[in-house]
Amino acid sequence: MASIALKTFIGLRQSSPENNSIKISKSLPTNHTHRRLRINASKSSPRVTGRNLRVAVIGGGPAGGAAAETLAKGGIETFLIERKMDNCKPCGGAIPLCMVGEFDLPLDIIDRKVTKMKMISPSNVAVDIGQTLKPHEYIGMVRREVLDAYLRDRAAEAGASVLNGLFLRMDMPKAPNSPYVLHYTSYDSKTNGAGEKCTLEVDAVIGADGANSRVAKSINAGDYEYAIAFQERIRISDDKMKYYENLAEMYVGDDVSPDFYGWVFPKCDHVAVGTGTVTHKADIKKFQLATRLRADSKITGGKIIRVEAHPIPEHPRPRRLQDRVALVGDAAGYVTKCSGEGIYFAAKSGRMCAEAIVEGSENGKRMVDESDLRKYLEKWDKTYWPTYKVLDILQKVFYRSNPAREAFVEMCADEYVQKMTFDSYLYKKVAPGNPIEDLKLAVNTIGSLVRANALRREMDKLSV
């Protein structure tokens, strides 16, 4: 998988915000000391008087947590609104090695360090992947409820106010530089689960509220094609769990998904078994059953402890920005095709968007406008758009039929393919290639596709 080199995240410096009243119907905790970023910003936007810039982040997943932390450290008065503090999104939970260092993640939130993968073809030909990994390299497996809570807690430690609430809608500004009025239902310990209607006035909004984003609807961001991901968490015996100690499995075939793949990913004391599809959503349970059957001998006797389903975007929304409102993560549509990766890109987009606001506001001292937030989109598209296009092409070429999937698995057996794939995935940058090996890879790929097409023609004859 190809990726483009990441820009280095700039460190932040401490400063203390001014204490001011907030136009909100509930009292909120005073911000902690913040770290701030020294920036030479444009003087065209008006200064914020008597307070710092106020920004709301809607959604407390990786995108929202990363955005809120960066904003708070950058001197922005930050509010993060999340309804389900224990949300368990149906997600494979794989994160690249670079994310551990780049986001300073503690190792104790990583359930498993996967160093081996099996890619299993429609005819159950299994290819072992991982032989090119160095001793310190691995794919991290996390549970979303653990990762998301950690990032939210870190945002709170940086000074963000984390609100347990359900975002309902927002009133648009009535004049330039006037506030957005957010309406939400608060669920704190005093409401006993009934909820209390609240409002909050802010200068800018980051929508990190997932594929069904209400923030996106508020700015008429448009629809996108989406996949349904279905996952079961299955607790298996200790001896069977040992098989998956550092191993993940990916199954391809029309039986498990006509346009995606099925997976078995290890967690702390169980495995996550799932699949997804864009084109045949009504058949998702049938595909899930097929995935379980393909892995049957390794998970038989297991107990299903949780069932999860969730939409996953297939491409960016037509609009990701309007005035002082920006979308990040799944709300913006940042999930790669072919691999279905979204956690890293969610956290990265949240951080990049927040950095643009910190920079444009001179650490919360000036108002921002659409041109400030557009810098985030320009940087994002320049850095990652080629990656999304390459993976889109790979999916169209290799996921279109069972013969093409057989060719894909055959290609994965090549050591050079494995090295290039893992280097690109783990570090989110294009691995330098060897011209001779690249030529051999091209020839082998063409050969695999020719054999796949020949096999498909023979299969078509049998089906007539």
Image (cartoon, rainbow, N blue to C red):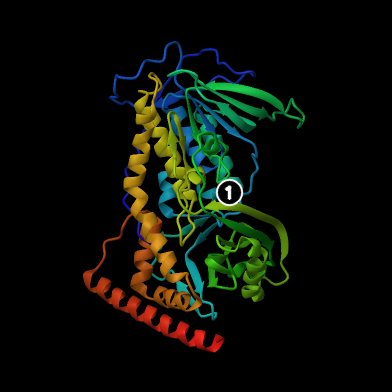
Residue 361's x, y, as percent?
37, 24
In the rendered image, the residue lying farthest to the front is 464
Seen in the image, is 55 located left or right of residue 435?
right
- Residue farthest along the top direction in this orientation: 50
Q: Hey, which quadrant is residue 411 in on the image?
A: bottom left
Quadrant where the image shows the C terminus: bottom right
Q: Which quadrant is home to the N terminus?
A: bottom left
Of residue 184 and residue 11, the one placed in the foreground of this image is 184
> Residue 54 at x, y = what percent?
48, 22
Side (left or right) of 442 relative to 228: left
Image label count: 1
* Vertical order, 140 against 35 (above or below): below
Q: Is residue 364 among the parts visible in the rendering?
A: yes
Q: Name the amino acid, label 1.
A: Arg
Q: Nearer the viewer, residue 92 or 239?
A: 92
Label 1 sits on residue: 144
Q: Is residue 422 above or below residue 23?
A: below
Q: Residue at x 68, y 25 (%)?
A: 197
Q: Residue at x 50, y 19 (%)?
A: 174
Foreground of the two, 240 or 401: 401
Question: Badge 1: how crowded within 10 Å, few (<14), some, or many (20+)?
Answer: many
Residue 248 in view (yes/no): no
Under circle 1, the secondary element is helix
Location of residue 251 with respect to 42 vertically, above or below: below
The image shows residue 358 at horizontal and vertical percentages of 39, 28
Q: Name the residue rendered at 49%, 58% in the picture.
A: 340
